[in-house]
Image (cartoon, rainbow, N blue to C red):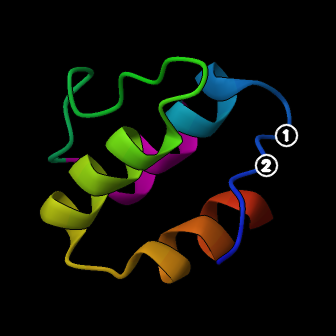
Amino acid sequence: MDKLELKGGWNVVKGKIKQAYGDLTDDDLVHEEGKDDETLGKLQQKTGKSRDELVKWINSL
C-alpha cells in the first residue's frame, strides 16, 4: 500500500482538498502525526474513493 507523503505541509494540502470537495469540513480534515489511516478513513467515507486513490491524489498535490 502506498504511504501518505505530505508535501508543503498539511494546511496547504487541506486547502486543496477543500477546493476539490467543498462539502468537507475542518473536522473531516483534522490530521495528526501518525494518524494517516484515521484521516484517510474519514476522507474515504466522504468522497467514496478508495484509500489508494486518495493517497495517490493527495501525494500528487
For disc 1, the neighbor class at 10 Å (few under 14, some 14 to 19, many from 20) is: few
User: Which of the two residues, 21 or 46, is positioned nearer the viewer here?
Assistant: 46
Task: Say if 32 sits above or below 42 in the image.
Answer: above
For disc 2, the neighbor class at 10 Å (few under 14, some 14 to 19, many from 20) is: few
Chain part drawn in magenta: 15-22
Is 6 on the left-hand or right-hand side of 41?
A: right
Q: Is residue 20 magenta?
A: yes
Image coordinates of residue 38 in percent, x first then y, are: 34, 41
Task: For mark 1, give the secondary structure.
Answer: loop
Q: Amino acid at mark 2?
A: Glu
Image coordinates of residue 25 in percent, x first then y, are: 19, 30
In the picture, the quarter occupied by the C terminus is: bottom right
The numbered dot on residue 22 is: none
Q: Which residue is mark 2?
A: 5
Task: Say if 11 sits above or below 43 in the image.
Answer: above
Task: For mark 2, give the secondary structure.
Answer: loop
Is 26 on the left-hand or right-hand side of 4?
A: left
